[in-house]
Amino acid sequence: MSLQGWRRADGRKGIRNVIAVVYLVECAHHVARRIVDRADDPQVHLIGFPGCYPNDYALAMMKALTTHPNVGGVVLLSLGCEGFNREALSSHVAASGRPVETVVIQQAGGTRAAIAAGLDAVARVRALADSEAIRVPVALSDLVIGTICGGSDGFSGITANPAVGRAFDSLVDAGAACIFEETGEMIGCEGHMATRAASPEVAAAIEASIAQAEDYYRAMGYGSFAPGNAEGGLSSQEEKSAGAYAKSGARPIQGVILPAEQPPGPGLYLLDVVPPGAPKFGFPNIVDNAEIGELMACGAHITLFTTGRGSVVGSAIAPVIKVCANPETAARMADDMDVDASRILEGRATLDKVGD
Amino acid sequence: MSSALIRLSPTDNVAVCCRSVAAGESLTIEGLELVVQRDVALGHKLALVPLKLGDVVLKYGVPIGSMTAPAAAGDWVHMHNMKSDYMPAHLRDATGDRA
């Protein structure tokens, strides 16, 4: 593979050189979005956190996302009075060797002035990110790849998920780090997963993470099972799980990591997305988009998203590749689907071929 | 693999419909003759053998829930006659699994 990327000071390599414009509270969202719109640069992306209260999770996520290997520079958008610790985030980005500027809307003079200041900041950060860029070849072993499923149906576990599993096996064999997730969608698979653990400690961590997910969903009163799953032919949480689990392939599981934690080495990891303790409203909130953000915060350069019913979730910073399980969806939503795994069902391709 | 049904594991007592099937259709899967009992959409499951109350439903060779009502061979197996052994599912009308 001959892919040119960008080397970062921490040794990781990016496959993009994105400028992230980051709103730190919902009140700054509009200004940040206008800056990104008006910058009119496909490599200037919008990310942010809408809450307004001290939140360790949000700070850890934003630190990880603003120093993601695909990010070359950062502009922070603060209203001014919000709870987010903008100084801590700015220092973290600066310490990573990336250019960073902060626009505080209340100090800049309001919406119009902050948009103008933000556009100037983006231009300066963009120029620095380009001039300081160190281009390097990127190998598969430099990559972190995530996988998630959404809008699953009766075909997801037959076509797209096992095809991604084959791809994961090849990527792990090539030295990449691969992350699969949604412990709530692995309920029922914990026994088999534990047999794939690289050590007894990892087996115990896997079983503990699934038990925590089961407690969480029991307290919520339902599993990670949406009405569309049932319309697509799935009848129970464990049926959905058995199909979802196929995304992980067959290689040993090296460890369980938390959102915004980097995989400590190559190989396959389980991301535990369920927060500890009793379920609470607020963040984190377990949905596909949040989980993609969490995979990216764990360093994922690319996320393989399998879907049967058809999801249209995209992503800033790191691309999301749609792998479609269902032949009717692949035809109906062709513009959104990148890989058609339903060919397997119709005998037009093998699992291994789609996995490649 | 262009047949109407796919059995994912040899121990499975249900098969997945690769296309929508109609009531009265005769299907053959791995030497087994089945008459479809009602219209079933693609991606959904058909019973390969008669299933009785409490039977464990096997797909991928693993349990995916238990029968809450009997089903004839060729009948649709879904949330009206099976439920999770772990936790209820929610539908848009919020009725969920039957207990």
Image (cartoon, helix red, strand yellow):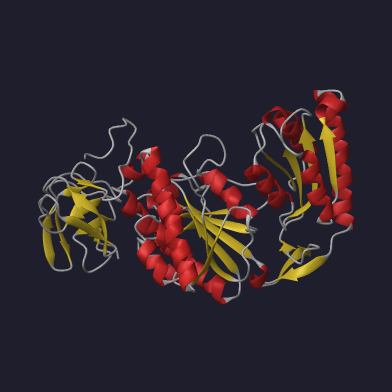
Across and down, in percent, residue A248 comes to 46, 64
Left or right, residue A14 beside residue B57? right
Quadrant of the image for the N terminus of chain A? bottom right
| Total marks in image | 0
Against A2, residue A232 (above or below) is above
Q: Is residue A196 visible?
A: yes
Against A279, residue A98 (above or below) is below
Q: Is residue A319 visible?
A: no
Across and down, in percent, residue B71 comes to 12, 49
Nearest to the observer: residue B35 or residue A141: A141
Nearest to the observer: residue A16 or residue A28: A28
Across and down, in percent, residue A37 comes to 74, 35
The structure residue drawn at horizontal position 36% and vertical position 45%, both measured from the top left corner, is: A229
Most distant residue in the bottom direction: A173
Nearest to the observer: residue B34 or residue A14: A14
The structure residue drawn at horizontal position 84% and vertical position 60%, both measured from the top left corner, is: A133
User: Which corner quadrant of the image does residue A3 belong to?
Assistant: bottom right
Across and down, in percent, residue A266 comes to 60, 71
User: Which corner quadrant of the image does residue A143 belong to?
Assistant: bottom right
